Amino acid sequence: MLITRRGGGMADTHDSKSCAQKACGFDSHSRHQLMDKISKIFLETLPVFGGILLSYLFWQNNLLLFTIYLTLTFGLIYLHKDKSEFLIFAYGVIIGIIIEVVGTSISGYQSFTNPDFLGIPIWLPVVWGYGFIAMKRISLIIKDL
């Protein structure tokens, strides 16, 4: 506890720790908001890690991965209740196809062991589409930090 005197000689008591925390923006409310944002970012990242695990488990079956990814993506969009994400998904799929086809067929800087759609796995554009959605969601969380 810190005691200070102000102009009229009256003593004010201040909790020096809380004053320092408030000056730095680390009061308990701010800390709670930050932890809430970090938790939301983590939750929005979980499907990405889940997708990596699915790719590891089922990489030899492109059609199965395509079906799983498409079902999960549409389910996640539906649960999020932002129907504009279907357009973001479609845009990400188109951009993903262009980038991957350029990388494999045109410039040849990459190749895939099991391609079945324009030189790429059929599930890969779906992953690009969801990647666009994940970045949109995470950026909206980060924007308010």
Image (spheres, helix red, strand yellow):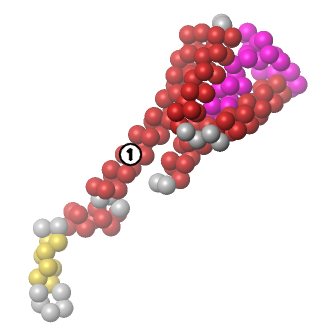
Quadrant of the image containing the N terminus: bottom left
Q: Quadrant of residue 65?
A: top right
Residue ID for mark 1: 36
Q: Residue at x 82, y 21 (%)?
A: 104
Is 120 situated left or right of 86 in this image? right
Q: Residue at x 68, y 39 (%)?
A: 88
Q: Residue at x 47, y 54 (%)?
A: 145
Picture coordinates of residue 98, whole percent (x, y)? 81, 30
Picture coordinates of residue 101, whole percent (x, y)? 82, 25
| Magenta span includes 96 | no
Q: Is residue 11 above or below residue 137?
A: below
Magenta highlight range:
103-132
Element marked by disc 1: helix
- Nearer to us in this view, 67 or 41: 67
Q: Is residue 142 above or below residue 89?
A: below
Evaluate whether residue 92 shows in this view.
no
Is 87 situated left or right of 71 in this image? right
Picture coordinates of residue 78, whole percent (x, y)? 57, 32
Number of marks present in the image shown: 1
Q: Residue at x 60, y 9 (%)?
A: 58
Q: Quadrant of residue 134?
A: top right
Q: Is residue 112 above or below residue 97?
A: above
- Nearer to us in this view, 38 or 112: 38
Tell me which amino acid carries mark 1: Asp
Is 51 situated left or right of 95 in this image? left
Q: Quadrant of residue 62?
A: top right
